[in-house]
Amino acid sequence: MHLDVTEESRWEAAVTTAVKEYGGLDILVNNAGVEITSLITEVDPKDIHTMLDVNILGTALGLRHGLRTMRPGGAGGKGGSIINISSVAATIAFPGIPIYSATKSAVDRLTRVSAVEAGKFGYGVRVNCIYPGLVPTAMGAGLANDMAELGLFGSAEEAVGAVVELTPSGRLGEVADMADVVVFLASNASRFVNGVGLPVDGGMGM
Ligand SMILES: NC(=O)c1ccc[n+]([C@@H]2O[C@H](COP(=O)([O-])OP(=O)(O)OC[C@H]3O[C@@H](n4cnc5c(N)ncnc54)[C@H](O)[C@@H]3O)[C@@H](O)[C@H]2O)c1
């Protein structure tokens, strides 16, 4: 169903629908994100608000509603696993994405504090995040173009080449590389993994 992650009422509708249609809520992936490339000296305050809203507020509302639903006494009430999508940008300093990087560092902290709170109050919910490397989705391909436009690289291909050069696995990420790790964190195979940020970047962020 349509869910604008910045809207509290849409979250309420989404978790209510999930519980009604599927009999519970076991897994939540906070994946929605926005990246608007800009040097810190040039950044438009409106763009700062957009990234804070989607990346931080959106993830925080997902955690709020996911945990309230999954915890004992909640509409789901059976515990579960929440996976937040942070970024390699939370672990290394890359020019052109200062606000985006700050929001993804915030996602990392939201993850860890939420895992501790869930543990303290016995929610039975694990909370983890992943740090994807560069993946050529609309966002990833757009970022390479923006880097070239800002003059940080000679061309988008050069920007991609520089990322690959930094990556011991020698290639960009693929969506399936991310999805497989999210499935692992959602599943019982990761039952004793909690409160971590897991790099899925071919070693780029080391
Ligand atoms: N592509 C990369 O290189 C890369 C690297 C690291 C992390 N990430 C993260 O991975 C996640 C997925 O990114 P992607 O590469 O698929 O980007 P994308 O731009 O291709 O897709 C982002 C998605 O978020 C959705 N979205 C934006 N605002 C929303 C809102 N208010 N409510 C609901 N949905 C909203 C968009 O509709 C879109 O489907 C994001 O959190 C992103 O920050 C991506």
Image (spheres, rainbow, N blue to C red):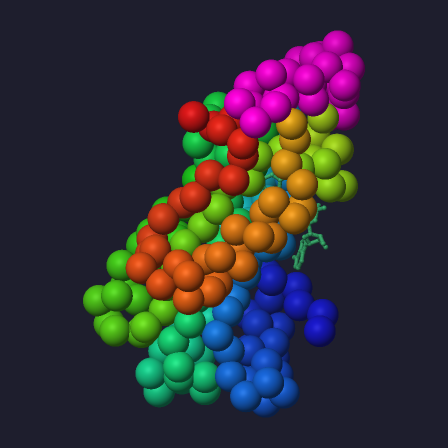
Q: Is residue 58 magenta?
A: no
Q: Quadrant of the C terminus?
A: top left
**x then y, percent, for residue 145:** 76, 25
Q: Nearer the viewer, residue 155 or 167?
A: 167
Q: Is residue 92 left or right of residue 39?
A: left
Q: Is residue 158 magenta?
A: yes
Decide: is 39 above or below 185. above
Please state the extent of the stretch shown in magenta in the rendering.
Answer: 145-170
Decide: is 121 above or below 202. below
Q: Nearer the viewer, residue 67 or 44?
A: 67
What residue is at 48 percent from the left and 46 percent from the top? 130
User: In the rendered image, which quarter is residue 197 located in?
Assistant: top left
**x then y, percent, for residue 188:** 42, 66
**x then y, percent, for residue 40:** 56, 24
**x then y, percent, for residue 14:** 61, 76
Decide: is 112 above or below 161. below
Q: Quadrant of the N terminus?
A: bottom right
Residue 150 in view: no
Q: Is residue 152 left or right of residue 155?
A: left
User: In the rendered image, which quarter is residue 43 located in?
Assistant: top right
The extreme left residue here reads: 120
Decide: is 28 above or below 168. below
What residue is at 75 percent from the left and 33 percent from the top? 142
What residue is at 67 percent from the left and 41 percent from the top? 174
Residue 178 in view: yes
Task: Please tell me how many numbered marks the rendered image carries.
Answer: 0
Q: Is residue 125 left or right of residue 161?
A: left
